[in-house]
Each structure stands twice: as C-alpha cells, then as structure tokens.
Image (spheres, grey):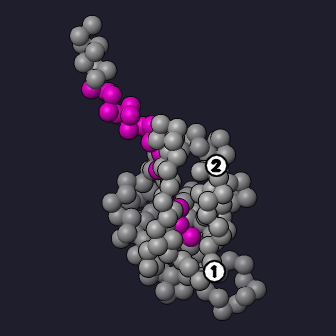
C-alpha cells in the first residue's frame, strides 16, 4: 500500500502537467505582394527575417507539434522553428478550425499554429469559446496569441513582437 501511495505521489506532477494545453498562434510573416493575382506568394526578404526572429522569440517554448496552412508564406514562417526542433510541419485546413478532434489530438501538448490575418484570431476565438480577437490588420505580422487550457479553464494573452 505504501509503495502504491509513493507511486501516486511521484506521478502526480506528471499527471498535472499533462492537463495543460498551450497554443501559440502567429500569422505568417511578410509576403511578396509583387503579383496581386498570385494566391500563394512566398515570403519577402523581410518576411524570411521575421521567420528567423520568431525562431528566436520562441526558442524556449518546448513545442510538441507545428501546424501550418498549405501556403508558401505560412510554411516558410514555420520552417526555421521546424528545422531547429527537428519537428515536421503538419498542414491543417483553415476552413476546419478548432474542433473536438483537433482539441483531443493536441490535449496536453504545446502547439505552434501558423495561419493568416483572419484565421489566426478566429482560431484563438474558437479555442476561447468567445469572440475576443478581431481580424489582424494587413500591415501587422508580429502578433503572438497564447491560449492556455488548464483544468478546464481557458486563459489567453496577445503580444506584439516587432
């Protein structure tokens, strides 16, 4: 009995740690706007620099998974972090934002999600279960949404990283 109690006490912190899910949501970095007809542009040089900056800003976050939409600009924004962490980039459908399957698959994990000016705040709002964040102005590429779920309570913060 004492052995069982000791195991439960030692496992307690690990069980509690698994009850927290952390979502880090960012919009893609600056995209090439030379051809307004191109629906899938790459990042500009400034955008590539911002992607590297995201890697530095988030270097101490222990990501378990990285998600990106299937666009050059989002993939290229996630790529420096993916390479540094040796984590694959998993594509997600921005039309099928947060749902029960996505929440279950990421429960207890620390997740990076790279999206767009409309989908990033929409996803944060879906996780929060309330309309807190509006669409990101097109000129802003340095917003970081952090949404934490712990013990069935949801917390969020919005940071501006320039």
Q: Is residue 37 left or right of residue 82?
A: right
Residue at numbered disc 1: 138
Mark-to-mark CA distance, 1 and 2: 24 Å
- Which of discs 1 and 2 lies nearer the camera? The answer is 2
Task: Describe residue 151's horizontal placement relative to residue 38 as left or right.
Answer: left
Q: Is residue 134 visible?
A: yes
Q: Is residue 143 left or right of residue 37?
A: left
- The secondary element bearing badge 1 is classed as loop
Q: Is residue 71 above or below residue 10?
A: below
The structure residue drawn at horizontal position 61% and vertical position 63%, both measured from the top left corner, is 133
Locate residue 122: give its quadrant. Answer: bottom right
- Tell me which residue sits at (49%, 50%) in the image: 155
Q: Is residue 51 left or right of residue 62?
A: right
Q: Which percent across, then down, holds residue 55?
A: 40, 69
State the residue at coordinates (28%, 23%).
9
Q: Residue at x 35, y 64 (%)?
A: 59
Element assignment for label 2: loop
| Number of the label disc, if any, that sits on residue 129 | 2
Magenta part of the chain: 10-27
Tell me the tag on residue 60: none
Asked whether 65 falls inside the magenta stretch, the response is no
In the rendered image, the quadrant that contains the C terminus is bottom left
Q: Earlier in the sequence, mark 1 or mark 2?
A: 2
Query: Can you give x and y, in whole percent of width and height, for residue 91 in the image?
Result: 61, 58
């Amino acid at each position: 009995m004492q052995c069982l109690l000791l195991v439960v006490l030692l496992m307690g912190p690990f069980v509690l740690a698994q009850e927290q899910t952390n979502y880090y949501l960012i919009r893609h970095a600056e995209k090439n706007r030379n051809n307004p007809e191109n629906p899938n542009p790459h990042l500009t040089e400034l955008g590539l620099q911002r992607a590297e900056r995201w890697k530095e800003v988030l270097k101490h976050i222990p990501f378990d998974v990285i998600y990106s939409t299937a666009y050059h600009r989002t993939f290229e924004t996630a790529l420096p972090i993916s390479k540094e962490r040796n984590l694959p980039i998993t594509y997600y459908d921005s039309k099928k934002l947060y749902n029960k399957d996505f929440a279950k698959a990421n429960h207890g994990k620390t997740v990076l999600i790279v999206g767009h000016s409309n989908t990033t705040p929409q996803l944060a709002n879906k996780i929060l279960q309330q309309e807190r964040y509006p669409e990101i102005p097109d000129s802003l590429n340095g917003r970081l949404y952090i949404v934490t779920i712990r013990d069935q309570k949801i917390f969020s913060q919005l940071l501006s990283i320039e």
